Amino acid sequence: MELLILLALLLAALTVLARRGDRSLRAVATICAALALAGLAWWRPGGDPVLEAAVPAPLDGGGFVSSDTCRSCHPGAYDAWHRSYHRTMTQRATPDTVLASFDDVRLESRGHATRLARRGDEFWADLPDPLWFIDPSPDKPPVPPRIEARVVMTTGSHHLQNYWVRRPKEGKLHRNSPDNGALVQVPWVWLVDEGRWVPVQDSFLGPARDEPNPPLVWNTGCFGCHSVATQPRFDGQSFASRSAELGIACEACHGPGEEHVRVNRSPLHRYRQHLRGDDEGDPTIVNPARLDQHRSSAVCGQCHSFGEPPDAAGWQQTGTAFRAGDELPPSRAVFRYEDPPRDPLLLRYLENEPDAMRGRFWADGTMRVAGREYNGMIESPCFEQGDMTCLSCHAMHAYQEAADQLAAALPADESCLQCHEGFRSRVREHTHHDEESAGSRCANCHMPHTTYGLFVAMRSHRVDSPSAAVTAETGRPNACNLCHLDRTLEWTSRLLHDWYDQPRPKLDGEQRTVAASVRWALRGDAAQRAIVAWHMGWPAAQQASGREWLAPYLAVLLADPYLAVRRVAQRSIETLPGFAGFGFDYVAPQPEAAAKMREAFAIWQQAKGGAPARGRPELLQDARGGVDEERVQRLLAVRDQRPLRIIE
Amino acid sequence: MTAADRADPAALHLRVGWWALLGFLTLGLVLEGLHGFKVGFYLDVSNETRRLLWTLAHVHGALLALVNVAFALTTRALPHWNGSRRRLASRCLLGALILMPAGFLLGGIFLHDGDPGLGVLLVPPGGVLLFLAVLLTARGTAT
């Protein structure tokens, strides 16, 4: 438009100048022509055409209108969404969206260097050709060629941010294979709260690996949940991806809005809706709050679940067929815990990822990886026997804060009390804890933090009651011992029996005599260790269990073979007295970690100093309050060393 | 409207115009205060329709107040323009002064998402009255 105006002005001025006439008019025309020429010299096309060409093109058809259209009529809803992390899940890489430092950064991991730089408003990566890592062929060259690629897209903005490039179209490339439309992940991820880069493969809980993992390709997987109605359009060779909108926007939850917009252009129609009240809703758009329980939950479950599209080939072409308001199963098969697995689709999935079940579920069938809350919810009595949906606790617009998007109208225990009103007047009688204490918060007992993701423990969304039997049989930590870290499973078993008449499971000697948290920290699998390390820094648990004995166990976890466990332990140990700014680099090689572990022991012993000895055998303390190293070593020797990967 | 007002509409419009100007300038101060204290009821993105409507109420009210003053001066300048059309123009102008700002103000109190409340229905008739008043006055100046 600007260009047209400038050209029209120039043309008009030249027309006037071409005629003989009034001198003053010709003077004005000369000035106009000069201004138009100056404008044309300065004019630059708007936007960033390179960036726009690199990210998926707008979807043609499908009835999507994008969030920009929704804004004019729903400014409040738009604003709430705009402040959410859903919006910023996928963004074009611009100075406004990139959170990481790109100031001539040089990174090296597993023998491969990556250099990152900012050039004006553009972000660039100089890295080994990602295609080399994806190529499984044994005869590939020993060293990958280096490429230089512009960072065009980002994923995430809350805890961490990933970056995506398009490979060059020409130059020295692996197998001379140019860009095929794939958006390929930069192998380093930015941790937002720490402000540091770590290798992408180290940002997941998994066994240490010397070899670099192949990079992810956005158009083959991530698009399904990190954008609206993206179609990969993969023809076997290249991608011609299209997307309704990057990020998780209005139409991911409300369905395509074109018909809604068309109908509501009429003010008469709109005011008829307003005056009729909210009882009937608008049939031209999906409101998840009006859907039945299964369809409403499916809106969130389309992403927050562990599952696969039944039609994998179609998915590579046209993406998910799910639209808000649909039932989930036709477009996404949600996997439930099976031992042994029988679901053919699950069996096919396990061919590619054999340890997926152990990495996703506790042995009692409860989900243990974050971001798959739907799986937990559908196993809950509140869902199976009640009317619970995601919106029973969460609100995507009227939320308390953007991190959890819990409903502002349902503070504290109100979500649960909607149905369990009877407990309101007898909290203490039910919980056996002070009414104001953490032990009387519904979620702390019925939704304990037994899910892991993004370096933290998160609440399980399988709403159930603490059970010593489940812990004894499956290893899933129970709420009682995750708060009362200094107590044994025997203690929990006895109280659950006395208070709630639960049957007492048969426990072995160690379960009766060693604090459950200590057992998880020393001999548990990597998920148990990460989860207990997080709880050792949880204020509620520290208040219930005391802090003075925690450091030795967190010190052990500082030298854990799993980087994720080390990071969680570092965060927790820094909450203890004497450890502020402990300065542990969890990415450092194992010998350095072992040295820091010893340093942490020394700090603890110094802090303990002349405090009166009060040895507690269940905490593996000797009579003088020191650590009983022999018993510690005995537990470490039987640690669950089976490799575990938790991929959120 | 008193008998004196009927006899001298200029005095009426001067009085109404200046008092209305005072009122709507006061409204402007109130709106500035809402900005100053960052009152969410007025400034939150979800209330942007309210902010627009109340700003329109302030602007239309103040401008219409000045138009009333201008109308008074016009009738004084055109003593020969007398009769039913001038009376009609006068009433239309007074009606517009009430209906347009009131419509914007009321429409901004209760919102339906991005749509104003029903009070905004006062605005179109107010606009028609203003149009008539201006048309009649313009024609009156030609007499």
Image (tube, helix red, strand yellow):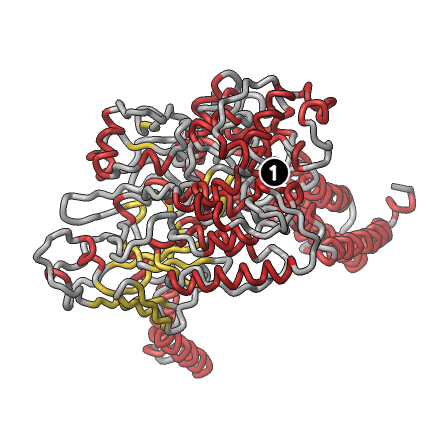
Between A348 and A468, the one lying in front of the other is: A468
Secondary structure at badge 1 equals loop
Q: Residue A516: x percent and y percent?
A: 53, 37
Between A558 and B14, the one lying in front of the other is: A558
Between A87 and A45, the one lying in front of the other is: A87
Q: Is residue A647 above or below residue A419?
A: below
Q: Which residue is mark 1?
A: A484
Q: Residue A416: x percent and y percent?
A: 61, 26
Q: Residue A373: x percent and y percent?
A: 45, 34
Residue B142 seen: yes
Name the image quarter holding residue A110.
bottom left
Query: Which residue ends up furthest to the front in the rendered image?
Result: A623
Q: Is residue A587 above or below residue A137?
A: below
Image quarter of the C terminus of chain A? top left
Left or right placement of residue A452 versus residue B26 in this view: left
The amino acid beneath tag 1 is: His
Residue shown at 41% from the left, 37% from the top: A252
Residue shown at 35% from the left, 55% from the top: A200
Image quarter of the N terminus of chain A? bottom left
Q: Residue A385: x percent and y percent?
A: 50, 16
Using a 10 Å C-alpha cutoff, classify the residue at mark 1 as few (fewer than 14 neighbours), some (14 to 19) or many (20 or more): many
